[in-house]
């Protein structure tokens, strides 16, 4: 039977004349940080002080010695970052030049010092560029010339921290006769029967050649076996009436163990185990009266995707533990999210990421790793890219959560719109990957899943790559140049990227910028704002609605976070209300890789921004929204649940002082997975000329199992004029604290409004770095009361809580 020895201990990193203790998996930065040789690059402006690390060569060393008694010993790396030359006892072992591949070296009988010499990624990229020639990209860094995490070279939300090291596990595998070299389960369902076709390939030793082998496969109580005289075979298992895997909110996520055993007459030689799920996935790209659709269909059910984009959760990915993946993805599921897009400038994530998605019902849209650049198609890159794609398709295809392969991020769009076409002058730029190589690999290895050439992509060159009427669309014009109300100007078929910036939580800023007097333009704040004219766009976004605060950082911080939440909500509410024409929204972005002002809903220290709580509201199964329209506001009841929804909705035209000017009850009838739209009666439409009237829609939502907001009332608001033109009264409210019985230091913050209180927000981290609360922004009418559950802050006073409460205050 194959034996495995994990090589996590005994590594050293050469740093000048010193040998530093190295942690594997890890990287040079984390080892230097642990040794006190560099400052924390996430703090202050230390990032620039450690830039030299990425421009140097580095060597890892370890003693290699073994006596396994097996015929063969392989040294297996799940990830080497990136360009490396390996020797054992001074003799060559091999070379690598791809962070995203696994590597296997035969070290049978070889002992001595194992040395892994990593070249500077900049030097490797320069050598490749010298062969292929120049290609354009959106950042002044050479990430398209090396198969490495692109965002490690810096992005408009990420630091420039160019890593090197053994970033994923390494082990010795000792085996005899034969081993399972590749296993590809293709899982389908038809007419109530699940089918698992397992395609496998074995590798043999010299003594194992020609020997008869036996392989067995078992799943869901069904077992089959086959004799293997060559190196490849296919086993089929038919599973009657399997329980189907569903996205969260549509059903359960049953998973089945698939076990393979390779044997000969002496007994088992090797085993393989994964969990699989039975479901069907289609991508409906049919043409219709509105253009060309892009709708995911799971188990025959058409799905509006409630998505987020995912970037690496740490600039040093080796630090991301399974527990951290689970925490972040559970946060996503708790916010009503059902799709996570793994973005093409990052990494193919660890198995723990996809395992968590399988269990939580989070659909995965997986980009191949190309982003925002023209990529050469010549060697040495082409061979690396093919090997990388094959490696990762085979690795990830058992996961039922994986729904879609996507060729690239924004490169087809970039070729057409970013002044690339002329300078390329016939040079290769990646089209052959996205429209040729990658779809062929997916069709060969994983034909049960759809592939799309890019995001955005209209389906063919017959339409502009980012045409909102065809395929996927990235909506960035609004954030860059317009007010968020402009999201309502169109109805794309599928919004794969859009978003709005805001700074992280105050406690995150204080940790990352110790001792700094915080201001929007203070040195540390500017360093942790990587977007071009990022603060200018933030300020313009605020100024369209509110007077821009001067010399009041706390108010600026609140307003920028508020506008982020409002902006993303405006887009999602509009696009969800136009289902099924629009079939999904994927917010840029869920998470951050360090403390930074960005588009994330959860900041780099893992603290939710107000946007996170807003996603819980707008991604709930049932959503009530008031949509502005030239003919007057429209009430939309969005029902993504499996049962009909016929709420009694109270519509009120209300004065700024809280007086109800007109009222009516309407009853939209939203069938399962549908939207009901009702024009607001004319006498209820607020008059913008007064600057005092607004519209409120309230519906009592019956309790239901699961889903954010269960058992709570739903409210939608429509203000016909910008906040700065509305006659807000000076907000007045009372605050009381009610301890919550039971474990922990939980307390209910009860806020009772005496006036209209718009967008009341508690920032819990101001009460303690570990404090959290269960609600985001809320608007209260005079006489209304809300209860905010606060925990993790220790004993608090009313005065302290009041200092952490913010609302719109223009009086």
Image (cartoon, rainbow, N blue to C red):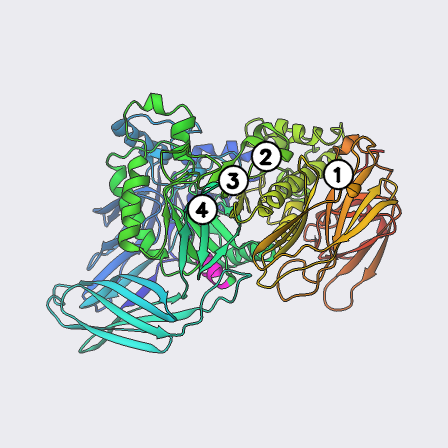
- On residue 492, the disc is 3
Marks 1/3: CA–CA distance = 25 Å
Q: Which of marks 1 and 4 is nearer the N terminus?
A: 4
- Distance (Cα) linking label 1 and label 2: 18 Å
CA distance separating discs 3 and 2: 10 Å
Q: Is the magenta region chiefly helix, strand or loop?
A: helix
Instruction: Please determine whether, in this image, residue 223 is positioned above or below residue 423.
Output: below
Between discs 3 and 4, the one toward the N terminus: 4
Residue assigned mark 2: 489
Q: In this view, does 365 lie above or below 487?
A: below
- Residue 521 visible: no
Q: Which of these two is toward me, 496 or 368? A: 496
**Mark 1 to mark 4 CA distance (whole Å):** 33 Å
The residue labelled by disc 1 is 719
First-in-chain label (1 vs 2): 2
Indicate yes or no whether the magenta region holds residue 357: yes
Q: Which percent across, then down, holds residue 545?
A: 72, 32
Q: Which residue lies furthest to the left in this view?
A: 210
Label 3 sits on a secondary structure element that is: loop
In the image, taking residue 699 as reference, residue 614 lies left or right, namely left
Q: Nearer the viewer, residue 19 or 575?
A: 575
**Residue range corresponding to the magenta coloring:** 352-359
Q: In which quarter of the image is residue 565?
A: top right
> Is residue 750 on the magenta stretch?
no
Task: Please say if the residues under marks 1 and 4 sit with CB atoms less than 8 Å apart.
Answer: no
Q: Could you say which disc has been placed on residue 294 in the image? A: 4
In the image, which disc is placed on residue 630? none
Q: Label 2's element?
A: helix
């Amino acid at each position: 039977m194959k034996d495995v020895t994990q090589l996590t201990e005994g590594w050293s990193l050469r740093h000048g004349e010193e040998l530093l203790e190295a942690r594997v998996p890890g990287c040079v930065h984390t080892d230097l940080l642990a040794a006190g040789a560099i400052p924390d690059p996430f703090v202050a402006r230390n990032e620039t002080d450690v830039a030299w690390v990425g421009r140097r060569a580095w060597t890892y060393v370890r003693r290699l010695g073994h006596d396994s008694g097996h015929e063969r010993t392989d040294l297996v790396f799940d990830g080497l970052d990136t360009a490396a030359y390996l020797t054992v006892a001074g003799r060559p072992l091999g070379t690598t030049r791809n962070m995203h591949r696994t590597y296997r070296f035969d070290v049978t009988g070889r002992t001595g010092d194992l040395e892994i010499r990593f070249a500077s990624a900049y030097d490797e990229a320069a050598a490749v560029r010298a062969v292929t020639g120049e290609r354009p990209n959106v950042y002044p860094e050479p990430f398209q010339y090396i198969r490495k995490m692109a965002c490690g070279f810096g992005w408009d939300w990420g630091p420039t921290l160019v890593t090197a090291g053994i970033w994923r596990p390494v082990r010795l595998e000792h085996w005899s006769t034969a081993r399972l070299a590749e296993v590809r389960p293709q899982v389908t369902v038809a007419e109530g029967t699940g089918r698992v076709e397992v395609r496998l390939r074995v590798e043999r030793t010299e003594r194992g050649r020609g020997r008869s082998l036996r392989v067995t496969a078992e799943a869901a109580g069904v077992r089959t076996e086959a004799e293997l005289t060559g190196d490849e075979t296919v086993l089929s298992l038919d599973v009657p009436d399997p329980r189907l895997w569903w996205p969260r909110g549509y059903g359960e996520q049953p998973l089945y163990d698939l076990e393979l055993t390779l044997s000969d007459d002496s007994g088992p030689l090797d085993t393989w185990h994964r969990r699989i799920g039975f479901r069907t996935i289609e991508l409906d790209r049919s043409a219709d009266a509105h253009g060309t659709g892009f709708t995911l269909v799971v188990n025959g059910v058409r799905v509006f995707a409630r998505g987020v984009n995912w970037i690496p959760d740490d600039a040093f990915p080796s630090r991301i533990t399974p527990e951290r993946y689970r925490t972040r993805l559970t946060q996503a599921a708790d916010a009503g999210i059902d799709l996570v897009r793994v973005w093409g400038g990052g990494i193919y994530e660890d198995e723990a990421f996809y395992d968590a998605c399988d269990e939580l019902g989070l659909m995965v849209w997986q980009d191949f790793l190309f982003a925002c650049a023209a990529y050469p198609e010549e060697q040495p890159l082409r061979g690396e890219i093919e090997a990388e794609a094959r490696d990762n398709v085979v690795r990830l295809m058992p996961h039922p959560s994986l729904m879609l392969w996507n060729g690239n991020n924004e490169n087809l769009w970039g070729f057409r719109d970013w002044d690339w076409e002329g300078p390329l002058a016939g040079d290769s730029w990646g089209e052959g990957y996205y429209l040729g190589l990658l779809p062929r690999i997916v069709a060969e290895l994983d034909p049960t899943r759809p592939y799309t050439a890019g995001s955005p992509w209209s389906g063919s060159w017959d339409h502009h790559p980012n045409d909102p009427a065809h395929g996927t669309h990235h909506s960035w014009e609004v954030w860059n140049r317009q007010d968020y109300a402009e999201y309502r100007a169109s109805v794309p078929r599928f919004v794969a990227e859009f978003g709005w910036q805001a700074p992280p939580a105050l406690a995150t800023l204080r940790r990352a910028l110790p001792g700094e007097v915080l201001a929007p333009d203070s040195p540390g704040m500017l360093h942790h704002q990587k977007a071009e004219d990022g603060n200018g766009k933030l300020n313009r976004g605020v100024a369209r609605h509110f007077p821009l605060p001067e010399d009041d950082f706390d108010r600026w911080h609140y307003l920028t976070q508020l506008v982020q939440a409002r902006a993303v909500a405006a887009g999602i509410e509009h696009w969800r209300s136009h289902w099924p024409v629009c079939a999904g929204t994927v917010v840029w972005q869920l998470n951050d890789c360090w403390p930074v002002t960005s588009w994330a809903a959860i900041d780099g220290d893992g603290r939710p921004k107000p946007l996170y709580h807003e996603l819980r509201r707008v991604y709930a199964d049932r959503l009530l929204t008031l949509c502005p329209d030239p003919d007057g506001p429209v009430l939309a009841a969005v029902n993504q649940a499996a049962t009909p929804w016929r709420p009694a909705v109270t519509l009120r035209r209300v004065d700024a002082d809280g007086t109800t000017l007109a009222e009516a009850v309407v009853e939209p009838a939203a069938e399962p997975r549908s939207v009901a739209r009702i024009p607001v009666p004319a006498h209820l439409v607020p008059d913008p000329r007064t600057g005092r009237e607004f519209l409120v829609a309230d519906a009592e939502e019956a309790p239901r199992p699961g889903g954010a907001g269960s058992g709570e009332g739903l409210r939608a608001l429509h203000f016909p004029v910008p906040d700065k033109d509305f006659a807000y009264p000076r907000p007045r409210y009372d605050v009381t604290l009610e301890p919550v019985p039971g474990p922990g230091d939980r307390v209910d913050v009860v806020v009772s409004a005496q006036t209209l209180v718009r967008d009341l927000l508690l920032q819990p981290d101001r009460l303690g770095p570990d404090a959290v609360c269960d609600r985001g922004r809320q608007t209260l009418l005079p006489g209304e009361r809300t209860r905010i559950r606060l925990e993790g802050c220790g004993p608090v006073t009313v005065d302290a809580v009041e200092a952490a409460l913010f609302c719109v205050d223009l009086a």
